[in-house]
Structures are given as C-alpha cells and as structure tokens.
Image (cartoon, rainbow, N blue to C red):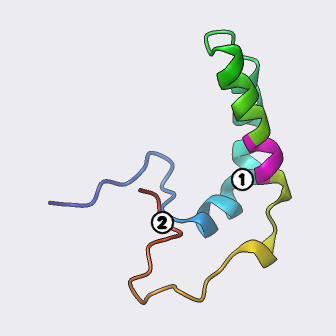
Amino acid sequence: MAEQQSRLGIDSISEFYHAWPGLRAHAVKLVGDERLSPAQRETLAWLVVIADRVGPADLDDAGAGDGDTRDRRP
C-alpha cells in the first residue's frame, strides 16, 4: 500500500519546523474559531507557543535515514 502523504506535504518534524512561519497564521486563526471548544482553542494556543519556541538546536537529525521514525508523523 502506498504511504499516504499529508495535504501539506510535511512528513517530519524538520519539515514542519521549516514550514511553521507560513503555517503559524493559520493556527492562530483557528485559535479564534468559535466552532472549537474553549479547551480545544486553549490547547491550540499553547501548541502555537510551543512551536514558536522550537529552534534549529531542537531538531535531531541524527537518526535520519537509519529507520528511526520518532520525528515522523504517525
């Protein structure tokens, strides 16, 4: 079976990190979406704060290519 690719074309933490500047506004917009519960909006707001704190030093490319899937989406 072919591996399913995300609509964003992001398959790893590193790829997400590099795409985050363009994705952040969308995430912030979702924080204000009243179709989400208050708990969902608060959780998403905290995830934006966490994503903003991730930097190049936080990325671990040591396992790249050796079958290590910890930085891959589930």
Relative to 2, 8 lies left or right: right
Residue at (48, 55) in percent of width and height = 9
Residue at (79, 50) in percent of width and height = 50
Query: Mark 2 near mark 1, Cβ–Cβ under 8 Å?
Result: no
Against 74, is 58 above or below?
A: below
Relative to 31, 36 lies left or right: left
Against 3, is 33 above or below?
A: above
Relative depth, front residue between 46 and 28: 46
Identified by mark 1, the residue type is Trp
Would you say residue 49 sits in the magenta stretch?
yes
Question: Most extreme residue toward the top, as rendered?
Answer: 34
Question: Most extreme residue toward the left, as rendered?
Answer: 1
Q: Residues within 10 Å of mark 1 (few under 14, many from 20)?
A: some
Relative to 31, 2 lies left or right: left
Number of the label disc, if any, that sits on residue 64: none
- SS class, disc 2: loop
Instruction: Choose the circle earlier in sequence order: 2 or 1.
Output: 1
Magenta span main SS: helix
Tell me the CA gap for discs 2 and 1: 16 Å
Q: Where is the N terminus found, in terms of image quarters?
A: bottom left
Residue at (85, 57) in percent of width and height = 53
Identified by mark 2, the residue type is Arg
Against 40, is 72 above or below?
A: below
Q: Identify residue for label 1.
A: 20
Span highlighted in magenta in the image: 47-51
Would you say residue 33 sits in the magenta stretch?
no
Q: Identify residue for label 2.
A: 72
